[in-house]
Amino acid sequence: MSPEPFLGADNHAPVRHHILSVLVENKAGVLARIAGLFARRGFNIYSLAVAPSEGNAQFSRVTIVVDAESAPLEQIVGQLDKLVNVVAITDLAPRDAIERELLLASLTVDNANRREVLDVVANAGASIVDVNALSVTVMLAGTPGACDDLEKSLESFAEVTVQRTGRVALPRLGPTATA
């Protein structure tokens, strides 16, 4: 088995964030109930991503990055566990998880800055997904830290629009490598 590709700095969430992987029944209103629970309890959601799980339309995996300073983790998990459509909850420690995020950025370019934009994109390990005479759209699927770094690198260019997905994460399978 080959090692996981490394795409940028391996910066993980600050300690105050916890990553919860929640397996839920794929039914109407489940996401609204989860969001409502967080809102009613005053828990802050840092990011949220949802998709069908393991190719099975019966279940979805919800990855929630929560601000653990807004409430104790045990309280968040306990409240989530009470929801009828929640099947399983896993708290993923950053060192035991694979985290990725998608960043898309559209930039206005001209002859004066086109080469500089392309250098920033190449140095970040990002890809160009659309280009024309006036703009470039780039994509990076990488660690949250790598996305942060690319976003900061692009701030110096005029007319930049950035959209990020929020984190998705799964537990590492097998032993964690030690340095």
Image (cartoon, helix red, strand yellow):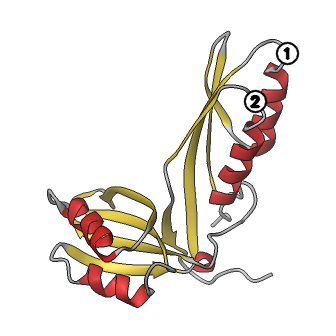
Looking at the image, residue 27 lies above or below residue 70: above
Residue visible at 66% across and 26% down in the picture: 159
Instruction: Report if residue 61 is visible in the image.
Output: yes
- The reply, left or right, for residue 125 in relation to residue 43 is right
The residue at 30%/87% (across/down) is 78
| Above or below for 3 versus 153 | below
Q: Nearer the viewer, residue 23 or 78?
A: 78
Percent of width and height locating residue 40: 27, 72
Left or right of 17 in this view: 10: right
SS at mark 2 in the image: loop
Mark 1 lies on residue: 112
Residue 58 seen: no
Q: Give residue 146's quadrant in the image.
A: bottom right
Q: Is residue 105 above or below residue 18?
A: above
Looking at the picture, how far across and down is residue 106, in whole percent? 61, 28
- Please report whichever mark, 1 or 2, sits nearer to the chain's N-terminal start: 1
C-alpha distance separating marks 1 and 2: 11 Å
Q: Nearer the viewer, mark 1 or mark 2?
A: 2
Task: Give the secondary structure at mark 1.
Answer: loop
- Percent across and percent down for residue 92 are 50, 78
**Amino acid marked by disc 2:** Phe
User: In this figure, which residue is indicated by the disc labeled 2?
Assistant: 157
Residue sitting at x 45%, y 81%: 91
Image height check: is 10 above or below 177?
A: above
Drawn side of residue 51 relative to residue 175, left or right: left
Quadrant containing the N terminus in the rendered view: bottom right
